[in-house]
Amino acid sequence: MQKYMQNRITLSLTLLIFNISATALEILEIKMLDSYKITRNFPGKLLPSEQSKLAFEIPGKINIINVDIGDEVKKGQILAELDGREASAQLEQAKAKYDLAKQVLIRYKDLRSQGHISIQDLDNANSEELIAKSQYDFYKVKFEQTKLLAPFDGFIQNRFLDTGSVINGGVPIIEILDSTNVKAHISIPISYTNNLEIGNEYLFKIGNKEVIGYLERLAPMTPGGSDNRLAIFNFNSFFDPGSIAQLKLSMTTSGRGTWVPIKSLSQSEQGVWAIYTINQERVVVRDLVDIIYFEGEYAYVNGTLKDGDLVILGGAQKIIEGKIINL
């Protein structure tokens, strides 16, 4: 931020250093501006891009749970299994019937080609094969439903039940969070979101790191008359879900003025702000200013200042108003 401010303010300030009567003066040549940027931080929470509570589709008794809280898992990994003995037996029987029906159909096709059986006999064999395949597919799905698989790479956030529990279908067993990507969810005033563009880069601070995030989308207005919108950002790196992300946004605001270091300002007992300048006659003048905005070590001020005015920064405490300065 300090580097950013310095780069920005060099557009309106030029630093000059003079030695006057053994007094070192830092003098800033200013340039008046028609607008300034306000920088604000908007906090938000990092959430996993995917989060799911997993459940079996069918009732049964939990035979084994292969994972615990904090375990990392891969997509397709078996997380838990129901007692699948009955489903396995049904699948084996259905497969045997299907294999037999396929063999019979092959034989009947051969016999029909030789004219030994009727078309009706072949059609019956076709029907039996289709029925057997349908039953096999049904019991195959039923057996697969006894296994709970990870839908994506992630880690286990919660485990709700233990081995031996008898459950109904749809009862959550495990909660899994995506371990490959997080998104920042941040509430931002409309006055700022109007300048945001999908896909653009934006600066974040997460912990002690400054990182780049990319605007993915802006959610619709929240109910209740809120003036904010929900902005969702993604990142190229992974961060711990639940961490706080600080979004830094700047907004250009119209207003005549210039940036000056805060240390160049003085305040009277009445609370009036002023800076010391050197006019064209090289006389020290005390100019009253209004402070419009503070940021870091600088203030954006306006008053009777003009382009090219010399603002005294350092050594001002040894300068008397009305004194002539030989530059």
Image (cartoon, rainbow, N blue to C red):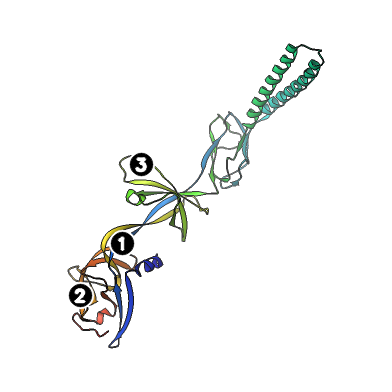
Q: Earlier in the sequence, mark 1 or mark 2?
A: 1
In this rendering, position of residue 136 left or right of residue 207: right
Residue topped by disc 1: 36
Element carrying mark 3: loop
Q: Amino acid at mark 2?
A: Arg
Viewport quadrant of the N terminus: bottom left
Viewport quadrant of the C terminus: bottom left
Residue topped by disc 3: 222
Q: Earlier in the sequence, mark 3 or mark 2?
A: 3
Residue at 38% x, 41% y: name it. 220
Element carrying mark 1: strand
**Whether label 3 touches label 2, CB < 8 Å:** no
Residue topped by disc 2: 286
Element carrying mark 2: strand
Q: Position of residue 3 (x, y in %)?
A: 41, 67
Task: Locate residue 297: give its quadrant.
Answer: bottom left
CA separation, marks 1 and 3? 30 Å
Mark 3: few/some/many CA within 10 Å (<14, 14-19, 20+): few
